[in-house]
């Protein structure tokens, strides 16, 4: 058996989805573990694909690496799981002449958006460990598949090439036909992968046969690698809580020949495909002879237009040079908006640089902040800074929401995770969290390049400045500042903090930022206390807020004297004094729409003369 020789002479048929068949058995845990616990099920699936006409099967090792197995508490079983999977594949192929591909799946994939993205060093260690299992047990080739991030694939491919001369098949995955998630074109990425030493380059997952074939129409035959196609059975649908793919296989029969004519030397299946789909591929081939030439469909490139300049000075530019004050007003919880807009107009007239509008803070439903922000901007000519939580929007809704921000001219966004729904008025509601806040920042900034999450051109570049949230109310601010560093790496333009109640926090935060060499502007939060009871509630029940014992005692004593509100304002002014010594940005949070309090603090903050050049 010689895989490279066979690929030079004919088209090979690969197997379909292992996970789909195991899923149909009701498995709800790591499929890779079944090579240990249910070996006969895995063996029978291999045999079914071989009987259906597969020249190639892949090991049940897609996620059998440290990072993915750790999610199931199986990180100590890596060697046993990979070893068992390879030996099962060898049992199934014994005497058949079928090739075995040792499969390694992408780690930072689009389907893992709820899981924190793994650092590159961890990915390298994880792949090396799995690769060594393949090399010890022996496979015919290495299959790298379902890589949405081309850079991760390139990194892994280099590791493979440093350790073995086995044939390598490297497949990327796309959301949009012909485009990678980072906006790169499929032909360019496949050529780069081929140049790094892959014997076969191709596409798998996400797309069905039609769109995958359309994508391959843009890819020329390469001089230094062959092509591969592993489409999904169809787009998935939900039936009785289960993910279901179309079971019709006749459709696949015509695509065996279509993929051959697009230059594919390996044709297999991904999610939803069964032995019957593979049988259909085999039956649809009019020949196994590879094509030598093809007509390539040109890519119609939609270059995003540059945005027109905005009128006036933007917050990010202003806060670098002078005192800049943001004032937060929560949208109303009822349809009565009179007090809200009355307050917004008064604050704007007094010099507020922007009105920030929360996104259902404390998981309490309010009028849409997008609607409120649009009214502020277009009816009152007041600059809004709009909050956006990852809690309330899945990835589809989030994408739509951000596009709406752009078209409404809402260009300043604070990206936050949001409080869990269980703390709000609707504890039975679900928190979405398709993205973490850092990924939301990254997504919003991607729109500035005119590229959607899927890599598709939006035909126009956005102009977003993105703020990130930070909580300085921790014991070790120096350590917590690493989070700011990370958010800046993901694209944050400036930072907005939770309110502080310790006059030393501003100094400590400033020193920690300088030590970490982080130079983005910071708006430090201040929120007036209304009473001792209010102070105790904030300290004990509101996430992210901590009061010093001194402040709590001052509020208790002031309450006894009937001057709790006055003491709360005095404390806020002391906090503003400390902020102004170190930062240009002040973030005033209005309690219970008491904009009269924010108005007084705004005027006080604006009276400070000290300016810091950033």
Image (cartoon, rainbow, N blue to C red):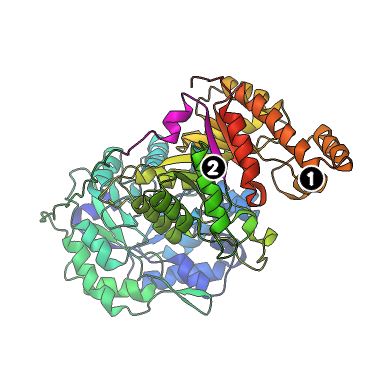
Residue 347 — which label? Answer: 2
Residue plotted at (65% across, 48% down): 594
Q: Is residue 67 above or below residue 351?
A: below
Q: CA distance from mark 1 to mark 2?
A: 23 Å
Stretch of the chain drawn in magenta: 310-328
- Dot label at residue 179: none
Please, is residue 588 above or below residue 335 in the view? above
- Secondary structure, mark 2, is helix
CA neighbours of label 1 inside 10 A, class few (<14), some (14 to 19), many (20+): many
Q: Position of residue 598 (x, y in %)?
A: 62, 41
Q: Is residue 582 left or right of residue 103?
A: right
Q: Is residue 59 left or right of residue 568?
A: left
Q: Position of residue 74 (x, y in %)?
A: 63, 53
Note whether residue 538 is visible. yes
Most foreground residue, 518 or 455? 518
Q: Nearer the viewer, residue 74 or 15?
A: 74
Q: Residue at x 73, y 30 (%)?
A: 502
Q: At which x and y percent is residue 300? A: 16, 52
- The residue under label 1 is 531
Nearer the observer, 93 or 534: 534
For image coordinates 62% across by 43% down, the residue present is: 589
Q: Position of residue 466 (x, y in %)?
A: 46, 41
Badge nearest the viewer, 1 or 2:
2
Element type where label 1 sits in the image: loop
Is residue 313 magenta-colored?
yes
């Amino acid at each position: 058996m010689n895989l490279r020789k066979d690929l030079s002479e004919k088209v090979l048929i690969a197997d379909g989805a292992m996970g789909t068949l195991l899923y149909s058995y009701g498995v709800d845990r790591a499929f890779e573990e079944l090579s240990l616990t249910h070996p006969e099920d895995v063996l029978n699936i291999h045999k079914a694909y071989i009987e259906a006409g597969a020249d190639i099967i892949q090991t049940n090792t897609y996620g059998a690496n440290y990072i993915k197995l750790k999610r199931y508490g199986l990180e100590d079983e890596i060697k046993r799981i990979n070893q068992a999977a390879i030996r099962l594949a060898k049992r199934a192929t014994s005497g058949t002449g079928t090739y075995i591909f040792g499969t390694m799946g992408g780690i930072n994939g689009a389907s893992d958006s709820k899981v924190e993205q793994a650092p590159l060093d961890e990915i390298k260690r994880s792949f090396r460990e799995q690769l060594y299992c393949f090399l010890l047990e022996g496979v015919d080739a290495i299959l790298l598949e379902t890589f949405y991030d081309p850079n991760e694939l390139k990194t892994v491919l280099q590791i493979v090439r440093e350790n073995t001369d086995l044939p390598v098949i490297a497949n990327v995955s796309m959301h949009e036909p012909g485009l990678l998630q980072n906006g790169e074109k499929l032909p360019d990425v496949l050529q780069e992968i081929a140049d790094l030493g892959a014997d076969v380059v191709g596409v798998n997952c996400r797309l069905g046969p039609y769109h995958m074939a359309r994508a391959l129409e843009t890819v020329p035959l390469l001089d230094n690698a062959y092509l591969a196609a592993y489409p999904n059975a169809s787009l998935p649908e939900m039936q009785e809580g289960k993910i279901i793919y179309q079971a019709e296989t006749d459709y696949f029969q015509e695509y065996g020949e279509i993929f051959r004519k697009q230059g594919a030397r390996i044709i297999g299946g991904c999610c939803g495909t069964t032995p019957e789909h593979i049988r259909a591929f085999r039956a649809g081939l009019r020949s196994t002879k590879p094509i030598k030439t093809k007509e390539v469909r040109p890519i119609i490139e939609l270059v995003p237009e540059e945005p027109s300049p905005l009128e006036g000075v933007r917050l990010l530019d202003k806060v670098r040079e002078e005192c800049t004050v943001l004032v937060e007003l929560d949208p109303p919880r009822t349809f009565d908006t009179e007090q809200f807009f009355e307050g917004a107009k008064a604050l704007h007239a007094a010099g507020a640089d922007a009105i920030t509008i929360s996104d259902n803070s404390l998981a309490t439903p309010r009028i849409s902040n997008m609607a409120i922000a649009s009214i502020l901007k277009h009816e009152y000519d007041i600059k809004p800074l709009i909050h956006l939580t990852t809690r309330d929007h899945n990835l589809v809704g989030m994408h739509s929401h951000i596009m709406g921000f752009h078209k409404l001219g809402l260009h300043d966004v604070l990206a936050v995770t949001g409080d869990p729904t269980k703390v709000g008025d609707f504890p039975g509601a679900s928190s979405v969290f398709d993205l973490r806040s850092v990924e939301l920042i990254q997504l919003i900034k991607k729109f500035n390049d005119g590229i959607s999450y899927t890599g598709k051109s939006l035909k126009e570049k956005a102009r977003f400045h993105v703020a990130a949230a930070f909580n300085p109310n921790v014991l070790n601010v120096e350590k917590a500042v690493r989070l700011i560093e990370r958010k800046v790496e993901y694209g944050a333009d400036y930072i907005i903090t939770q309110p502080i109640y310790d006059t030393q926090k501003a100094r400590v935060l400033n020193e920690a930022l300088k030590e970490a060499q982080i130079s983005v502007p910071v708006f430090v939060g201040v929120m007036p206390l209304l009473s001792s009871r209010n102070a105790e509630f904030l300290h004990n029940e509101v996430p992210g807020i901590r009061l010093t014992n001194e402040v709590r005692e001052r509020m208790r004593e002031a309450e006894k004297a009937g001057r709790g509100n006055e003491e709360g304002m005095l404390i806020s002014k002391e906090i503003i004094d400390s902020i102004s010594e170190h930062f240009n940005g002040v973030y005033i949070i209005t309690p219970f729409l008491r904009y009269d309090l924010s108005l007084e603090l705004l005027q006080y903050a604006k009276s400070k003369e000290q300016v810091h050049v950033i």
